[in-house]
Image (cartoon, rainbow, N blue to C red):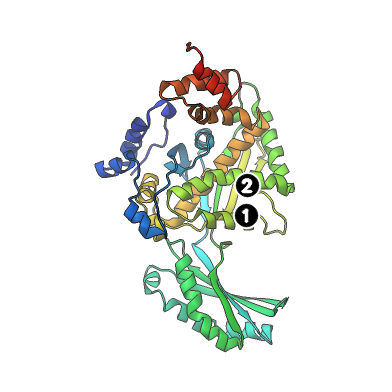
């Protein structure tokens, strides 16, 4: 179905009105609408089956980012996150991107690595060749453990062997099973395959197998996004588009050369990606681990994005990073809201979900860089954070907006000031 991702005046609506709008836009039935409308959408019995020692459930705000256009398709993006300004920044950058056609994305196949560690090897290079000589046998053995995956077109595709000749425990050999996991995140699949070949690898190498586990550096499972903005699009009342572009490029270059800045820069990217991963029930810790390891692949921690000037002066942004996400298995299938989040986006494959996530990360990154390069990060962030401060001070209902207006007007967003406003007389 075709979805209109534009959400005009969305912030001014009530939560119920927003839900009505999204439900109609994505074609929710009454049951799905009711599930989102009520608190506690994750039943305690389901939560108890997901992890151990459950005593309750913990909720985050679930919002939607609008205006995203990805490969010509409008996408409404669900985001589960607690930090103010994230959804607003991503939506605004997505809105501006539509002028030049939105985001263009691509991805590699869903290949994951399983590592089999071998120690106590007398001849590590000889052991490597022995494993490679029997590669097809080991691939067949791994594939014998998951007939369903094979039937879906996936399975172990290749084996790499890495030698570490001089460790504190002597020589170490590590075999990598390269597995096409289709629409799964793939952890359970690759772990099972690694365990299935361990005995045969011991026999081939004469060593002892220790770890048999996936790698979260999913460097064969990459998602990419590309976006373009003209100077006219980025101009504000206070800053020309040229100034904004220069500021964004300078900010990016700072992150590219300095790991202290890159850590915060990449955190801003993950501000956009993690909420999508959480909303869809995927493993956001795995995505985070892979992202930061990939940012260090050159031996130096650097930016996950690039921002540069095109020949015509446009600002061009790109991102490429590991994106090990799935549509099947785990919380993605168990959690009721995760299933609804996937329906909102109308995704057909894990690769498409990964591409949406990196597009949101790229938008979020520009939102932060644009603010940093112009009025500073606090102006917009604190204006949105003011609602939290007002509620912390005890504001309720219509009082919240009144206190927020007062604090923002004088640029003084503090809990004690909010309490002082609430204790004083009300005016317009």
Mark 1–mark 2 distance (CA, rounded to whole Å) = 8 Å
Q: Is residue 204 visible?
A: yes
Q: Secondary structure at mark 2?
A: helix
Locate the N terminus by quadrant: top left
Q: Residue 225: x and y, percent? A: 55, 48
Relative to 394, residue 31 above or below: below
Q: Are marks 1 and 2 in contact (CB under 8 Å)?
A: yes
Residue at the image point whose x is 43% and y is 69% from the top: 154
Q: Residue 251: x and y, percent? A: 69, 39
Q: Secondary structure at mark 1?
A: helix
Q: Residues within 10 Å of mark 1 (few under 14, many from 20)?
A: many
Disc assigned to residue 266 = 2
Q: Is residue 74 visible?
A: no
Q: Which callout, 1 or 2, points at the residue further toward the start of the chain?
A: 2
Of 198 and 150, nearer the camera is 198
Q: Residue 110: x and y, percent? A: 49, 62
- Where is mark 1, residue-wise? 292
Left or right: 390, with 208 as reference point: left
Relative to 337, residue 412 above or below: above
Which image quadrant for residue 407?
A: top right
Of 411 and 25, nearer the camera is 411
Which image quadrant for residue 17?
A: top left
């Amino acid at each position: 179905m075709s979805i209109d991702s534009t959400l005009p005046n969305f912030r001014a609506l009530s939560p119920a009105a927003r839900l009505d709008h999204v439900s109609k836009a994505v074609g929710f039935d009454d049951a799905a609408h009711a599930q989102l409308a009520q608190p506690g959408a994750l039943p305690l019995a389901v939560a108890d089956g997901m992890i151990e020692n459950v005593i309750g459930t913990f909720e985050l705000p679930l919002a939607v980012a609008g205006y995203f256009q990805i490969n010509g398709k409008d996408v409404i993006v669900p985001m589960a996150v607690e930090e103010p300004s994230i959804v607003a920044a991503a939506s605004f950058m997505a809105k501006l991107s539509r002028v030049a056609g939105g985001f263009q994305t691509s991805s590699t196949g869903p290949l994951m690595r399983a590592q089999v560690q071998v120690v106590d090897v007398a001849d590590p290079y000889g052991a490597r060749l022995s494993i490679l000589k029997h590669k097809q046998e080991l691939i067949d053995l791994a594939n014998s453990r998951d007939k369903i995956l094979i039937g879906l077109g996936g399975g172990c595709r290749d084996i790499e062997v890495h030698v570490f000749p001089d460790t504190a425990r002597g020589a170490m050999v590590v075999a990598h099973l390269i597995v096409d996991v289709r629409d799964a995140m793939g952890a359970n699949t690759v772990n099972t395959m690694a365990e299935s070949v361990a005995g045969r690898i011991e026999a081939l190498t004469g060593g002892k197998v220790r770890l048999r586990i996936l790698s979260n550096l999913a460097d064969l499972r990459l998602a990419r996004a590309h976006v373009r903005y003209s100077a006219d699009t980025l101009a504000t009342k206070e800053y020309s588009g040229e100034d904004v572009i220069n500021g964004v490029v300078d900010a990016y270059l700072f992150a590219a050369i300095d790991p202290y800045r890159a850590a915060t820069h990449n955190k801003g990217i993950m501000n956009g990606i993690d909420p999508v991963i959480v909303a869809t029930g995927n493993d956001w810790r795995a995505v985070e681990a892979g992202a930061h390891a990939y940012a260090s692949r050159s031996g130096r921690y650097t930016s996950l994005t690039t921002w540069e000037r095109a020949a015509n002066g446009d600002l061009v942004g790109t991102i490429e990073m590991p994106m090990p996400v799935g549509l099947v298995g785990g919380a993605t299938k168990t959690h009721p809201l995760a299933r609804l989040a996937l329906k909102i986006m109308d995704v057909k494959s894990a690769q498409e979900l990964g591409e949406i996530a990196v597009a949101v990360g790229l938008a979020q990154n520009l939102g932060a860089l644009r603010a940093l390069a112009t009025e500073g990060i606090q102006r917009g962030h604190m204006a949105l954070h003011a609602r939290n401060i007002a509620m912390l001070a005890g504001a309720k209902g219509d009082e919240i907006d009144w206190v927020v207006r007062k604090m923002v007007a004088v640029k003084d967003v503090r809990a004690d000031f909010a309490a002082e406003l609430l204790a004083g007389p009300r005016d317009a």
